C-alpha cells in the first residue's frame, strides 16, 4: 500500500464530531449549561501540563461533558535541534489520559537556540525543513499512536531560498510524516492575502483529502493588513472560505477559536451553529 493510501485510510476511520469550540476559561460556566450546542471541545494541551489540581479538575469536568481534542503549541516540530523529550513525555501522558480520536500541533517551530518564541514561526520551504519535520514527527509518533494532525500557520514574512511552494511544502510534510491536516481557514485567508496572493489559489494546491479538522475565527484589518486576532465575529470572507473547504474536504469537525474580547457565549454559539449547518449541508455529518 502506498504511503498516501495508507494515510487516507487512517483518516477515513476517524469519527465525525461536528461543530465545536476551542475552550477558554471565560466560557467555562456557560459552556456547561449549553452542552447540547457544542459537539466537542478543543483544549490547549499545554495548559494541563504541570497544572495545579484545580486546573486538572477543570479538565475532568470538561471531559465528563464533551469529547476533548488536545491542541499543543510548544512541541516545535520544526526545530532542527532535538525536540524536548520531557515535553514529549508530558504530552504523551496527557493524550493517554484523554484518549482523543486525534491530537494536533503546528507546521513550524516555537523553539530555537534555547529561546521560546511563544507562537509558531514558519520554516524555510526546503527539502531540509521537510526532513527536520519528518524526523521529529517520527520520534513523537513512536511515543504516541493517536493520529497527529498539523495546522497551517500564518506569518507576515517568509524565508528566502524556498525550494517548494508553501502548499507543496505542507503536502510533503503531511505525506512524509503520515499526518492529517488541521486547516485553519482564517490563517489561510490572512496569510495568503497579506502576502499578496489569493486564498483560493492557495487552497487549490493543498491536499484537501487530508483535512480532518478545520479552525475558523474572526480577525480585523489594520493599515491594510489582515490580523487573525481571534477577537471578532467571523467575517463573510472566512465563512465563504470555510464553505469552500467543507464542500471539498472530508472534514471531521469544525472548531471556532475565540481568544480575546469575549462576548456572552450565545454570540459565539450562533457561529458554531452556522458552521454545523455548513457541515450538514455538505453531508459531513447529520
Ligand atoms: Fe488555529
Image (tube, helix red, strand yellow):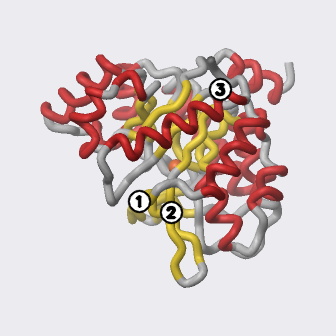
Q: CA distance from mark 2 to mark 1?
A: 6 Å
N-terminal-most mark, 1 or 3 = 1
Percent x, y of residue 267: 39, 46
Q: 219 or 116: which is nearer to us? A: 219
Q: Is residue 111 above or below residue 226?
A: above
Q: Which mark is residue 254?
A: none
Q: 34 or 185: which is nearer to us? A: 34
Q: Residue at x 21, y 38 (%)?
A: 51
Percent x, y of residue 168: 80, 52
Percent x, y of residue 80: 57, 56
User: Which residue is disc 3 drawn over?
Assistant: 280
Where disc 1 sits, the SS reads strand
* Occupied quadrant, residue 188: bottom right
Where disc 2 sits, the SS reads strand
Q: Is residue 114 visible?
A: no
Q: CA distance from mark 3 to mark 2?
A: 25 Å
User: Which residue is disc 2 drawn over?
Assistant: 219
Image quarter where the N terminus lies is: top right
Select label 3 or label 2 by which is in front: 3
Is disc 2 surrounded by few (<14), some (14 to 19) or many (20+) residues within 10 Å? many
Q: Is residue 167 visible?
A: yes
N-terminal-most mark, 2 or 1 = 2
Q: Which mark is residue 231?
A: 1
Is disc 1 surrounded by few (<14), some (14 to 19) or many (20+) residues within 10 Å? some
* Occupied quadrant, residue 182: top right
Image quarter where the C terminus lies is: top right
Amino acid at each position: 500500500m502506498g504511503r498516501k493510501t495508507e494515510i487516507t485510510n487512517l483518516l477515513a476511520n476517524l469519527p465525525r464530531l461536528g461543530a465545536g469550540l476551542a475552550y477558554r476559561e471565560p466560557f467555562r460556566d456557560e459552556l456547561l449549561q449549553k452542552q447540547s450546542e457544542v459537539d466537542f471541545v478543543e483544549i490547549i494541551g499545554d495548559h494541563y501540563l504541570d497544572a495545579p489540581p484545580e486546573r486538572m479538575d477543570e479538565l475532568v469536568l470538561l471531559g465528563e461533558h464533551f469529547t476533548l481534542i488536545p491542541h499543543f503549541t510548544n512541541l516545535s516540530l520544526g526545530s532542527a535541534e532535538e525536540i524536548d523529550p520531557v515535553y514529549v513525555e508530558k504530552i504523551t501522558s496527557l493524550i493517554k489520559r484523554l484518549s482523543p480520536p486525534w491530537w494536533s500541533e503546528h507546521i513550524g517551530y516555537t523553539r530555537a537556540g534555547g529561546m521560546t518564541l511563544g507562537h509558531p514561526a514558519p520554516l524555510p520551504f526546503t527539502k531540509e525543513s521537510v526532513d527536520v519535520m519528518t524526523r521529529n514527527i517520527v520520534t513523537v509518533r513512536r511515543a504516541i499512536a493517536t493520529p497527529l494532525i498539523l495546522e497551517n500557520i500564518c506569518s507576515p514574512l517568509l524565508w528566502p531560498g524556498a525550494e517548494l511552494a508553501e502548499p507543496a511544502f505542507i503536502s510533503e510534510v503531511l505525506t512524509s510524516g503520515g499526518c492529517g491536516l488541521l486547516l485553519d481557514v482564517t490563517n489561510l485567508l490572512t496569510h495568503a492575502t497579506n502576502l499578496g496572493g489569493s486564498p483560493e489559489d492557495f487552497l487549490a494546491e493543498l491536499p484537501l483529502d487530508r483535512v480532518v479538522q478545520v479552525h475558523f475565527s474572526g480577525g480585523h484589518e489594520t493599515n491594510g493588513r489582515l490580523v487573525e486576532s481571534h477577537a471578532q465575529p467571523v467575517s463573510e470572507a472566512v465563512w465563504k472560505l470555510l464553505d469552500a473547504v467543507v464542500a471539498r474536504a472530508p472534514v471531521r469537525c469544525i472548531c471556532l477559536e475565540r481568544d480575546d474580547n469575549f462576548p456572552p457565549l450565545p454570540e459565539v454559539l450562533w457561529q458554531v451553529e452556522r458552521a454545523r449547518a455548513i457541515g450538514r449541508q455538505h453531508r459531513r455529518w447529520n
